[in-house]
Image: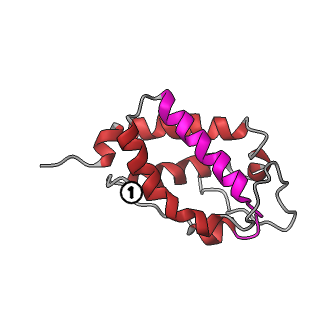
Amino acid sequence: MQSSLYDHLGGKDAIVSVVDDFVARCANDGRINAKFARTDVPRLKTMLVDQVCEASAGPCTYRGRDMKDTHAGMGVTAGEFDALVGNLVSTLDQFNVPKAEQEQLLGLLAPMKDDIVELDSPETGTPLPDMYQPAAPLAS
């Protein structure tokens, strides 16, 4: 029986740790943190954990909005997307995730780029447009 990427990543607890570090990196990165100005961080973490868990063949179900709806109107640039991916790679390196598993995970997430990036520009640090409406907070 072959183990899944989810198993290779260390299961849900490991994914939670990676997401926590990744979100903190993004919050401290001036190239992209403006895009998270009105984000409900607990919701973001929950959605990211479920998304990575499901994408890696784990037992989770992602129940969030699709990436196109989530990012519509944010004005995300290609440069900001690349910076975010760089933060993810740094987090995966910090947790000693082997390159093969990193490439497999990034390969699962890469197709989302077309649904997230609205501006084909290398620019980073652009503000979140006033008109952007984030998802509602998770119910308590």
Question: Which residue, given by chain and number where applicable, does mark 1 sit on?
Answer: 54
> Residue placed at 79% from the left, 66% from the top?
132
Q: Nearer the viewer, residue 41 or 35?
A: 35
Q: Position of residue 114 (x, y in %)?
A: 60, 68
Q: Position of residue 4 (x, y in %)?
A: 26, 49
Vertical placement of 1 versus 11: above or below? Answer: below
Amino acid residing under circle 1: Glu
- The quarter of the picture where residue 64 lies is bottom right
Vertical placement of 39 versus 62: above or below? Answer: above
In the shown orientation, is residue 6 left or right of residue 63? left
Vertical placement of 12 versus 116: above or below? Answer: above
> Residue placed at 42% from the left, 28% from the top?
96
Main secondary structure type of the part rendered in magenta: helix
In the shown orientation, is residue 6 left or right of residue 83? left
In the shown orientation, is residue 110 left or right of residue 43? left
Q: Position of residue 129 (x, y in %)?
A: 85, 62
For the view shown, which residue lies furthest in the right direction?
130
